[in-house]
Image (cartoon, helix red, strand yellow):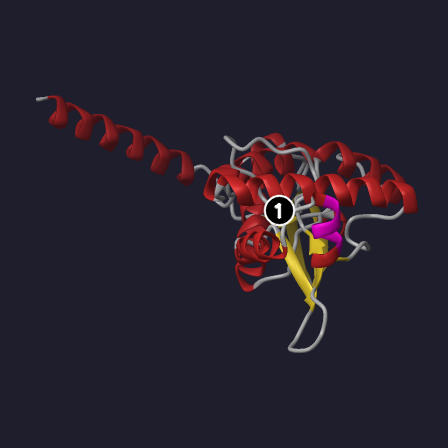
Amino acid sequence: MEGMINRLKSAAIIKKHKNANKLLRPVHVFNPYADLLTFTSKSLRARRDHSKYLNLIVAITYLFQYQRKVRSMEFDGKTIEYINVTLADIEKANEIANEVLGRSLDELTPPSRNLLALIRQMVTARCNKKKTSAEEYHFTRREVREYSTWSDFQVKTHIRQLQELEYIYAVAGKKGKEYVYELLVTDSIDEDKPFMVGLTDTKQLKKKAKKAGITDE
């Protein structure tokens, strides 16, 4: 009986969503913040997720079309109606993307998680000293060994997992050459909460948009 009732409830919910979708108008969506958004593109998976992330923002804006100002432009002799993406739309997309497309530190073994924390400490300290960003700072396994005081075997083993799971990125390093890495996870993160690498926080995005003269108006 409980299963049958749940199916009936599901059918009612789906019907409500379908009816709501029928109320949506065919309108274009423009994202004025697109050039300001950041997203790591160091791997094939990341590039695929980037496309999903941008489409997610567009979908959210489209669903909120009745709360958005409808604008128009002339194109090819026709009047095209469109709505703009807002910071609120991007914030919603970030929350959903973290849950759906994100990852958690739980996927790391405890030693790899500890090594990631040490690498983040090292990169943050050195970036502050050199007044540079984490994207511009590259480090070697030797630097990690010296900072962490771990053995070469420990560093080599666990840095491999960090690289495979895309917490760090190998900038260079072939046979006979020194491995050079870039840290992809720089923000404060919670191991129990999924997160996406490289997403721009909406507070930072708001500052960037202000400088670029972009507003939600």
On-image quarter of the C terminus = top right
- Image coordinates of residue 21 in percent, x first then y, are 41, 39
Provide residue 89's location: percent of width, then percent of height. 62, 36
**Furthest-left residue in view?**
1
Q: Residue at x 60, y 50 (%)?
A: 167
Residue located at (53% from left, 52% from top): 52
Q: Is residue 88 left or right of residue 3?
A: right
Question: From where the camera sits, is residue 76 visible?
Answer: no
Q: Which residue is mark 1?
A: 197
Q: Quadrant of the N terminus?
A: top left
Q: Which residues are magenta?
A: 143-147
Where is residue 73? Give x, y as percent. 72, 53
Q: Nearer the viewer, residue 138 or 80?
A: 138
- Answer whether residue 2 is visible to the viewer in this image: yes
171 w.r.t. 123: above or below:
below
> Which of 148/25 is in front?
148
Question: Is residue 43 found left or right of 75 in the rendered image?
Answer: left
Report if residue 141 lies within the magenta region.
no
**Closer to us: 79 or 212:** 212
Q: Residue at x 62, y 48 (%)?
A: 29
**Residue 116 location, x and y as percent?**
63, 44
- Element marked by disc 1: loop
**Residue 4 occupies quadrant:** top left
Q: Name which residue type carries label 1.
A: Val
Which residue is found at the position 13% from the left and 21% from the top?
A: 2
